[in-house]
Image (tube, rainbow, N blue to C red):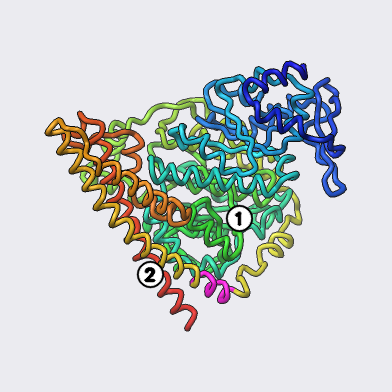
Amino acid sequence: MIQENIQFFESHFPDWVIKIKDLSEDPAYQVEISKSGDPTLSVEKDGDTILFHSKYHPKREAAKLISAAIEKEPEVLIIGGIGLGYLVEEALNLFKRCEVVVCDFDWQILKSLLENRPVTQLFSNPRVHTVFADNPQALIEVMKPFQTTSIKLITHQPSHRLHPDYYDKLKSAVDYFQNTKEINVATLNRFQKLWTKNTLKNLSPFITHKGVRHLFDQYKGIPCVVVAAGPSLAKNIDLLKDIKGKGIIISVDTSFQILQAHDIDPDFVIAVDPQDINKKYFENLKKSDAILVCEPSISPKIVRQYTGRKLMLGSSFHLVEWLEGMTETKGNIEIGGSVATAAYGLGVKLGCDPIVFIGLDLAYSRNQTHMKGAYFEENWFYQWNRFENNHTRSRSFLKKFGLFDVKAHDGGLVKSDRKFQMFQAWFESQFKKVDNTIIDATEGGACIKNCEALPFREVIQQYFCNPNGYRQQIEGISKTNVQIEDHKALLAKVLQEMEKQLTAFHRLDKEVKKGKQLAKELYNHVFTSIRRKSPFPKRVQAIHRQLDTIDKMITSDSTLNALISITIQNIINEIGDNSDKDLNEMEKENHDLKVTKQSMNLYDGVAEGIQFNVEQFSKAIQRAKNRLTH
């Protein structure tokens, strides 16, 4: 086996063989045989033993790790840390189409692999691409041919423990590649201008208030109820009074007013939607002890209106990550696109068990969207068509939006749509990932899989039956200080960094304006050459080189890159999708002319993105200065 591996490597990776043969034996690297008969590897580091694979069944362990880490097959899977090859093999077994890129730099580990397992089939697989280099940036050259942002990185945790700096840099390299791909090729994360605008308007409360992570796992074993605002909430809302203090009540913003109308004060209310209309859920409220858990991108009007305690959420949005890097990590939760998914994610992070849902219809029960009394329900049909009666309105809505039947909670059928189906699939997928008991006590709407369905009254009798409840524990935890003591110092620090970013925007703006002029000149040269059926002039190559230099400047700063990208989603997506809807006939017919037109559009978009961010950062800087001087 060893000889076969060496021969294969000598013909395919001769430089690697030289490195491996030059290695001296390192006693820190030990290979043993697992219970299944497959080899496993352990490495000594600083007096600790790092076990790279299971002592019992390495292949089974690798399969579980891959399945747990990846819900949907990406187009490109990057595996950081080759180990003895088990993760790579199981990824190839599980996924039949994706390209697998393996990154490592520890030649002792590769030597252990060659000496103990057959590798010819693995390394000869056309879907496997290997990067063995001290600098993780070498990954970028391998990734360039892949025209996609459907990329997933899995880092082998024992490899990370052995070489944390390398794998941290690898993650940065992947992030850089994806950002570059987003800004130049096409598929930026679908952030909207509103997220940036709201986050910057909420800058002061984001810095002033602690993150929700301070409460993570503080409610272990305490039951909670997630109160969504579906039509079936009416069946059970009055029962919530019986469980106050016996468990946690998490309200979505949509149901907060309804709960107050029934004299129920939840422990938490969560808001994640950036739209201004959501402020309606926080109007005319009674005084509440509920903690508002919110993303910094929600409407600043909500943050101002709500006078109770607040805890902030973190986010994968680059601006928020940048702010967290200067202040504190707020804490992320799983969010599947709706406030109800966020409320569930909060319950999981708090440590609650069981997690019970009421009002989670995920369907148009009785042709309603929400329980009566919710602002959205009261205004929805009225806004849809105010000149038709309810029956006609319902029928028109069902027809226009293509609703369809799905299996209902009671075994019958109920109307749903793609949005609800997406949320339902998210919940069902997430329920399989946790050990918590999940109970759907909605008693209406769609039939949700991977959880237990029980009437809410039975749930109360079974899980909220502690006569003393958890009131003292809940109140003790919930009354913790939500303010950051040195928030003014942090605000001053952020202000300084924002001023630096503003300067960087101005500097980049000058280069982008040059890019716009060059892109327009390039278009004119290409257009003229095509019309005259003549070769492109030499000037075209020079313009391409200049534009490449400007492109690198745009993508070199990941923060500027991400902030600009949110304003040019239509342009980026059209380029990525190879759309020609805004092209004239000549541009559609000629590839070179089409590409140059897209380049012009991209530079116009980047210029717009810079201007937008300059305006928003300037306003945020002034607000921060005012806050610090008052």
> Does the image show residue 585?
no
Residue 44 placement (x, y as % from top left): 84, 42
Position of 583 relative to 217 (above/below): above
| In the foreground, 91 or 233 | 91
Residue 36 placement (x, y as % from top left): 82, 21
Q: Is residue 491 magenta?
A: yes
Position of 12 relative to 164 (above/below): above
> Does the image show residue 424?
yes
Residue 507 shown left or right of residue 176 in the figure? left
- Residue on which the image places disc 1: 331
- The number of callouts visible is 2
Boundaries of the magenta span: 487-495
- Residue on which the image places disc 2: 618
* Residue at image point 49% right, 79% down: 628
Distance from disc 1 to disc 2, alpha carbons, whole Å, reads 28 Å
Residue 31 shown left or right of residue 143 in the figure? right
Regarding mark 2 in the picture, which secondary structure is present there?
helix
